[in-house]
Image (cartoon, rainbow, N blue to C red):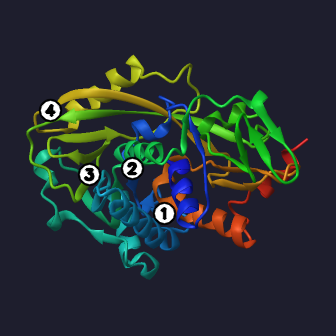
Amino acid sequence: MAGTILANTLLNAGKSIKVIDNNHNSAATKAAAGLINPITGRYFAKSWNIENLLPIAEDCYRDLEKQLQAQYYTSVNIYRALFTIEDANNWSLRVQDERYEQFASNGEEKCNLYKLTNPTESLALIQRGARVAISKLIQDYKQFLTQKNQLLSETFDFSKLQISTDQVIYKSVQAKGIIFSEGYRLTENPYFNYLPIAPAKGESFVLSTKCKWDKSKVLKHQQYLVPISENQLWSGGGFKWKFEDEAPTQDYFDKQSEALRNFVKFDYEIANHLAGVRPCMKDRKPVIGQHPKYNTLFVFNGMGTKGTSLAPWCAKQFVDFLLYNKTISPEVNCERFAKYFD
């Protein structure tokens, strides 16, 4: 996802590019809902920098819709189940907080989702959310790059990379620089493996149902229920820091299918079980910028659990730095981890 957005931002800035991609099957994007959620966590905190992220993200995805002649971006309201009186009281404080005015509201009277799931203490309404059909977007964009002869479908071979102060050469490709956007595989990159990436594995279900679900409404109950097509919902949430491999697990299937049975009141079938690994950073911020030693090597990574909202803003930061020598925000600049570089 991050690489797709960055590639398009560079093309829109008039740069020529060559993308190298091996269709990594366990990339987090393939198991993700593509949800943009302005308020997250047990304390109902605004997502970092969300006021700046939202307009840039919407412009980015709307532009891609025009460019590729397809729909990817859907504005949604997110209804979050509040399970206790304490949760309800804490949410009420957010609704009264003017800093949350554009995002936080009460949701009980505005949502018919109660009849589809077990009721809870109350519902919070999170406004200005969105869902991006990221799997479709990535596949469409790969086809676009292929038609323009700008995609090499192969696994990158670091032994074939030649680095100098003013260019890089990879096999027959000569360029002014190379940008690594490898997701959690950055841990295997000999130039950027000093960065403290913390891979986090997530799993999800695709549910088939005849239940009519408004595509503009998302429910966060014991799990997320996100409409992804007329007859399908994405169900998931949470992640693991420790895992044996990238594959879907029986443990997740057993626990989460039982959880679904306990709170869902409509008929459904589990049509697919997905898994992917997110490239999270220890400080939960993206990592973008220039290598501390090689000035033709760059990184664009670490979008973590909020890549759909972060990637467009980060791509703008990166391209402004690369082309116009503007300063990357220190909160996402890879320079903040320079002390780890040996």
Labels 4, 1: front one: 4
Please state which amino acid type lies under the numbered disc 2.
Gly
Instruction: Answer above or below: position of 292 versus 24.
Output: below
Labels 4, 3: front one: 4
Name the N-terminal-most of marks 4 and 3: 3
Q: Is residue 114 left or right of residue 327?
A: left
Look at the image and tell me in which quarter the C terminus lies.
top right
Real-space CA distance between mark 4 and mark 3, rounded to the nearest whole angstrom: 16 Å
Secondary structure of the residue carrying tag 4 is loop
Please state which amino acid type lies under the numbered disc 1.
Ala
Residue 329 seen anywhere in this rendered image of the structure: no
- For the residue pair 268 and 323, the one nearer the viewer reads as 323
Secondary structure of the residue carrying tag 2 is loop
Q: Which residue is mark 3?
A: 219
Q: Residues within 10 Å of mark 3 (few under 14, many from 20)?
A: many
Instruction: Answer above or below: position of 104 versus 210.
Output: below
Name the N-terminal-most of marks 2 and 1: 2
- For the residue pair 112 and 298, the one nearer the viewer reads as 298
Whether tag 4 and tag 2 are in contact, CB under 8 A, the answer is: no
Real-space CA distance between mark 4 and mark 1, rounded to the nearest whole angstrom: 32 Å
Name the N-terminal-most of marks 3 and 2: 2
Q: Any mark on residue 34, and which? A: 2
Secondary structure of the residue carrying tag 3 is strand
Residue 110 placed where, x, y %?
16, 66
Q: Give me the residue at 66% from left, 70% from top.
A: 320
Q: Which residue is mark 4?
A: 268
Instruction: Answer above or below: position of 195 versus 272.
Output: below
Real-space CA distance between mark 3 and mark 2, rounded to the nearest whole angstrom: 14 Å
Residue 87 placed where, x, y %?
37, 58
Q: Is residue 111 left or right of residue 194?
A: left
Whether tag 2 and tag 1 are in contact, CB under 8 A, the answer is: no
Q: Quadrant of residue 182?
A: top right
